[in-house]
Amino acid sequence: MERVSAARLRVLFLILALLSTSVAGKTVYWQALKRPELLAQAIDQVRTDQVLAAQRGVIRDRTGAILATTVPLRSLYAIPAQIPENERARVSVALGTLLGRDPLAIRARLDGGAEWLFIHRRLPEETARAIEDMHLPGIGFQAEPKRLYPNDTTAAHVLGFVNDDGDGQYGVEGAYDTLLRGTPGRLMVERDPANRALAIGVREAQPAIRGSDLTLTLDLGIQAAAERELRLALEKEKAPGGSIVVLDPRDGAILAMASAPTFDPAGVGVADLESLRDRAVSWSYEPGSTMKALTIAAAIDQRVVAPTTSYNDVGYAIIGGRRLNNALGRAYGPTTVTQVLERSLNAGAVFVASKLGAQKLYDYIGAFGLGRPTGVDLAGEVAGQVRPLAEWYPVDVGTAAFGQGLTVTPLQLAAAYAAIANGGTLYRPYIVASRRDAEGEHRTAPVAVRRVIGPETAATLRTMLTSTIDNGIAANARLSSFSAAGKTGTAQIPDAAGSYESDEYISSFAGFAPAQDPRFVTVIVIERPQSRLLGTLSAMAAFRGLALDALRYERVQPDRRP
């Protein structure tokens, strides 16, 4: 027998030692260093991690009426690989018939190469049951939440909507989306090889946290009245759009907010972008003569004029080398500051503003909240525009005095008039009165932004604005059995060239009632009324109809005899 050399034995031994070391190293690597990763992969094969959707919070009006809620509906999906080729035509026709859709379009989606796809989201339950009873191959259902708005289009812009991904858009749904949507939970379930949950398997759950419920300051009754009056005014004037805002002047609570054109929160897929815009907060316009009340309030507050201060009205005023005319150029002769409001005189507003001065006028415009967001808790607010004082020309003192050359939102103007109505304090408008979560109810505290004018000035303006309705140009806003205060506004519409459109206007009315103890303030704006300069008649008619409904609804006692 041939003997094995010592050298060969040493080589063989070395090879065996290296192999043993390698095996041992691999064993240590997989059993020690890689053990957590392997264990996780093994667990993943027998466990599924599911997201538990949180229920979105309910939105109610101040009386408790439901404005928005969520219900579970079934969405139809398909797994094309589980539908035999010779069955796809039958499945497409069956689904097309029940869904009212083109079977060829459904077939094209099934043949599109997707592993999984939605066929139809959030089906009516009767349709879902009919499809379920057909036992179609590769067809299944997945529960999805559906946001419902029981009052159809009422308060659509205030509420906003929820898209198919569950995200709140616009209005309260957008501004309070994080609170409303809650926090999703998780459920880990151990399954067998057939993907069935094991009754004795591991289950680890982190429950979903329900979204907060919101109670709004909005009153469904007053909101319905505002939307009715806006609709009637726009129909009469054949106007393309408009807005109504109703505030409680005592704390800035929004009682109603209507905007047109409008949309259906349950059918936003067919709505155009313009209809989604809430004109109360996302649209600005020149306020016109409604601005005169703020100009006169500032001048009286600074004691540079009084209600009985007079000047000789010649139908126009010269300021900065420019001539600014009264409406129709009419001259009135000796005229008091009270009559400036009663007759809505541009020349009179220029007279008052000249007494006040550019700096003080600018300061009061800012103090009343114009040119800056109100801070309302709604999505999409714009600031309006007031140019910096350094950019003013001398004539701008005159034009700003009667609401030209600056822009406001309806909500801004309503908040400014609320300061006159409540004794001089500007409040931040708000729409959510309280929210309720697992920790209880959290009420919104009203925010007094600043004192704009003194109580005596505010009382004086209330009397002057009451006379504007009782004895002046706003007579069509007079109420039976109730005193009312207010001012009309007619403004031209700026064009792209920096001038104004020919014979196109925005008509408005700002007012409150009862005059000396106001329970609500409203601003009504009509865009491009067909009656042109007479559009304020429709705005006053809307105020009259809304005010009488709101006062009776609130059971306010009449302060005048019919």
Image (tube, rainbow, N blue to C red):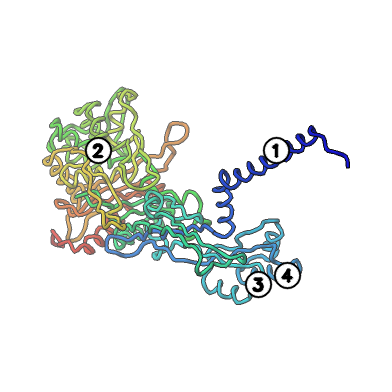
| Amino acid type assigned to the residue bearing label 3 in the image | Leu
Whichever of callouts 3 and 4 sits on the residue coming sooner in the sequence is 4
Q: Which residue is mark 1?
A: 18
Q: Residues within 10 Å of mark 2 (few under 14, many from 20)?
A: many
Whichever of callouts 2 and 3 sits on the residue coming sooner in the sequence is 3
Which mark's residue is nearer the viewer, 2 or 3? 3
CA gap, disc 3 and disc 1: 61 Å
Above/below status of 195 relative to 494: below
Q: Which residue is mark 2?
A: 368
Which mark's residue is nearer the viewer, 4 or 1? 1
The picture places residue 10, in percent across and down from the top left corner, at 75, 34
CA gap, disc 4 and disc 1: 61 Å
The picture places residue 125, in percent across and down from the top left corner, at 51, 72
Which mark's residue is nearer the viewer, 1 or 2? 1
Along the viewing direction, whichever of 526 and 1 lies nearer the viewer: 1
The residue at the far right in this view is 1
CA gap, disc 3 and disc 4: 9 Å
Q: Which residue is mark 4?
A: 87
The mark found on residue 443 in the picture is none
Whichever of callouts 4 and 1 sits on the residue coming sooner in the sequence is 1
The picture places residue 427, in percent across and down from the top left corner, at 23, 44
Which mark's residue is nearer the viewer, 4 or 2? 4
Residue 342 visible within the image: no
Along the viewing direction, whichever of 205 and 300 lies nearer the viewer: 205
CA gap, disc 1 and disc 2: 88 Å
Along the viewing direction, whichever of 531 and 290 lies nearer the viewer: 290
Q: Which residue is mark 3?
A: 136
| Amino acid type assigned to the residue bearing label 2 in the image | Phe
In the displayed structure image, the side of residue 279 where residue 308 appears, left or right: left
CA gap, disc 4 and disc 2: 70 Å
Q: Identify the secondary structure beneath mark 3.
A: loop
